Image (spheres, rainbow, N blue to C red):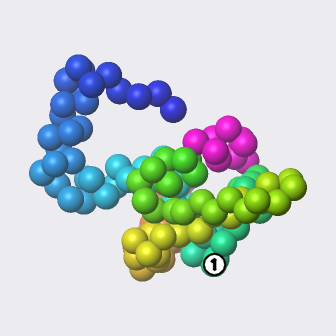
């Protein structure tokens, strides 16, 4: 995941929009192809890295690690490291992360509805 140069106009535009619009700020926190899927699985409780990897079979280990780090940096998930051999690491949603539950559920319902409408529209056009 590349970072935008802080001197670019793109960075300035994103920063200004994020500062002015709380919904844009929120969307940036959970942006990324995998973030919502990770949060959705963590709604069910704590999971280890390998458990998340198994539930998201198409994600690479590197991308999972990057997404988990981003979500942790943004305060959406918490990582707990246990002093065992081998080390055990659990991931779970923070209190603010759990507040995403109704949003994730609503996005899921909207996505299913949109997919159905889109499929029907494609059939009607064929």
At x 24%, y 21%, the residue is: 8
At x 68%, y 64%, the residue is: 90
Left or right: 70, with 46 as reference point: left
As for residue 48 lying within the magenta part, the answer is: no
- Look at the image and tell me whether residue 124 can be seen: no
Would you identify the image quadrant in which residue 45 lies? bottom right
Mark 1: few/some/many CA within 10 Å (<14, 14-19, 20+) = few
Query: Farthest residue toward the front?
Result: 83
At x 23%, y 38%, the residue is: 14
As for residue 65 lying within the magenta part, the answer is: yes
The part of the chain drawn in magenta is: 58-66
Residue 45 to residue 90: above or below: below
Left or right: 65, with 1 as reference point: right
Q: Position of residue 124 (x, y in %)?
A: 49, 62
Q: Position of residue 87 (x, y in %)?
A: 79, 55
Q: Position of residue 126 (x, y in %)?
A: 54, 54
Task: Determine whether the residue tagged by mark 1 lies in a helix, strand or loop.
Answer: loop
Q: Nearer the viewer, residue 30 or 126?
A: 30
Q: Which residue is mark 1?
A: 44
- Look at the image and tell me whether residue 75 can be seen: yes
Residue 11 to residue 114: above or below: above
Q: Position of residue 34 (x, y in %)?
A: 57, 52
At x 71%, y 41%, the residue is: 60
Left or right: 105, with 48 as reference point: left
């Amino acid at each position: 995941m590349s970072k935008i140069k802080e001197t670019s106009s793109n960075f300035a535009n994103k920063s200004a929009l994020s500062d002015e619009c709380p919904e844009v700020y929120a969307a940036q926190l959970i942006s990324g192809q995998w973030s919502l899927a990770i949060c959705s699985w963590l709604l069910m409780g704590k999971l280890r890295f390998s458990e998340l990897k198994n539930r998201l079979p198409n994600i690479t280990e590197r991308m999972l690690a990057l997404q988990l780090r981003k979500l942790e940096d943004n305060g959406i998930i918490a990582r707990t490291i246990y002093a065992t051999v081998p080390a055990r690491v659990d991931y779970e949603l923070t209190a603010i992360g759990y507040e995403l539950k109704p949003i994730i559920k609503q996005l899921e319902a909207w996505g299913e509805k949109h997919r159905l409408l889109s499929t029907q529209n494609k059939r009607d056009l064929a």
